[in-house]
């Protein structure tokens, strides 16, 4: 039988995982906003002038490699954090069936 202490601890672990996922998702949102801002500025001032979307994307990734790398990293971290939340939820749900 599950004890009250175990339930509280499970919620605490889940809460920590959710906070971590939220923080990392916020980082990814900020990184996306940065990329969008620098790309928009580059299009406006003519540094990006590709004829189609894929050409513009390629130019943007070349011009702003560091910003795109940061975006890719933060999105990856956010995905991993969401995965940890899902795994924690599954683990805690499994404990309830013991």
Image: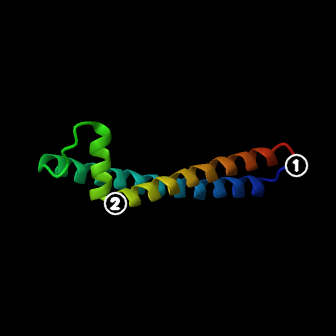
Q: CA distance from mark 1 to mark 2?
A: 54 Å
Q: Residue drawn at (35%, 50%), measured in percent from left and top?
A: 32
Outermost residue toward the top in this view: 52
Q: Is residue 39 left or right of residue 54?
A: left
On screen, residue 64 above or below 36: below
Residue 41 or residue 90, whichever sits in front: 41
Outermost residue toward the left in this view: 45
Q: Residue drawn at (21%, 47%), measured in percent from left and top?
A: 40
Q: Read off the residue under disc 2.
A: 65
Q: Label 2 neighbourhood size at 10 Å, few (<14), some (14-19), many (20+)?
A: few
Eye-nearest disc, 1 or 2: 2
Q: Residue drawn at (47%, 57%), measured in percent from left and top?
A: 24
Q: Read off the residue under disc 1.
A: 1
Outermost residue toward the bottom in this view: 66
Residue 57 or residue 21, whichever sits in front: 57
On screen, residue 50 above or below 26: above
Q: Residue drawn at (13%, 49%), measured in percent from left and top?
A: 46
Q: Secondary structure at mark 2?
A: helix
């Amino acid at each position: 039988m599950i004890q009250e202490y175990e339930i509280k601890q499970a919620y605490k672990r889940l809460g920590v995982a959710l906070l971590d996922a939220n923080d990392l998702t916020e980082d990814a949102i900020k990184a996306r906003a940065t990329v969008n801002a620098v790309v928009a500025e580059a299009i406006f001032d003519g540094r990006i002038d590709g004829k189609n979307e894929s050409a513009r994307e390629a130019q943007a990734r070349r011009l702003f490699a560091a910003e795109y790398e940061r975006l890719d990293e933060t999105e990856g971290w956010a995905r991993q954090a969401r995965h940890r939340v899902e795994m924690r939820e599954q683990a805690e749900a499994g404990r309830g069936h013991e």
